């Protein structure tokens, strides 16, 4: 009986070890997104050190809109400005407030970047999608926020 109990205890420890190992095979992103590129084939060995990149994930809602502006307009652009975003592939125009502006220029292009966020609950916007951008008055963003299904200014 002691030998049987020892066998059960050993089996339970083995099960717990296997459950922990299985749990360690799952990686969770800190955001909602989609796998845009798989970098490792199923069954391939992924190392912890040095780390192996296994996939590229894209956040899809909201989606970051990254814009590059020439240095000549730096003094005219500020956080909170409204961007009119035309998406030719979708035939849509949306509005988004500017959230962040890079504090540094890219020396080779004499340009700076800025970021806005576009809601994307329907997942129609894709990472890397082309957009035409114009800076417009802040009332356009307020109007869009108040009338998301109405006419845009």
Image: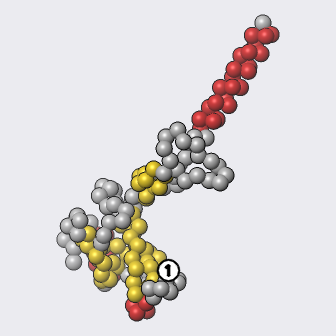
Residue at the image position 30 percent from the left and 78 percent from the top = 133
User: x and y percent of residue 53 in the render?
Assistant: 55, 53
The quadrant in which the C terminus is found is: bottom left
Q: Which of 61 and 22 is in front in this view?
A: 22
Whether residue 92 appears in this view of the structure is no
Q: Position of residue 111 (x, y in %)?
A: 44, 85
User: From the image, which quarter does the N terminus lie in?
Assistant: top right
Q: Vertical placement of 111 versus 39: above or below? A: below
- Choose top left, top right, bottom left or bottom right for residue 126: bottom left
Residue labelled with disc 1: 102
Residue drawn at (26%, 66%) of the image = 148
- Foreground of the two, 107 or 16: 107
Looking at the image, residue 42 sits to the left or right of residue 52; the answer is: left
Give the image location of residue 108, x and y in percent: 47, 85
**Residues packed near mark 1 inside 10 Å, few (<14), some (14 to 19) or many (20 plus):** few
Circle 1: element type: loop
Question: Nearest the camera: 135 or 55?
Answer: 55
69 on left or right of 45: left
The residue lying furthest to the top in this view is 1
Left or right placement of residue 103 versus residue 144 in this view: right
Quadrant in which residue 60 is drawn: bottom left
- Give me the residue at 54% from left, 42% from top: 44
């Amino acid at each position: 009986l002691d030998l049987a109990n020892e066998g059960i205890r050993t089996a339970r420890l083995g099960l717990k070890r296997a459950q922990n190992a299985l749990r360690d095979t799952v990686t969770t992103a800190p955001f909602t997104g989609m796998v845009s590129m798989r970098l490792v084939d199923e069954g391939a060995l992924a190392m912890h050190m040095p780390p192996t990149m296994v996939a590229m994930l894209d956040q899809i809602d909201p989606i970051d809109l990254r814009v590059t502006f020439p240095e000549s307009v730096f003094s005219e652009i500020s956080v909170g400005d409204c961007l009119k975003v035309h998406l030719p592939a979708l035939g849509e125009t949306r509005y988004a407030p500017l959230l962040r502006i890079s504090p540094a220029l890219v020396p080779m292009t004499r340009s700076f970047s800025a970021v806005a966020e576009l809601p994307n609950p329907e997942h129609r916007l894709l990472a890397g999608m082309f957009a035409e951008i114009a800076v417009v008055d802040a009332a356009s963003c307020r109007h869009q926020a108040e009338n998301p299904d109405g006419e845009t200014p």
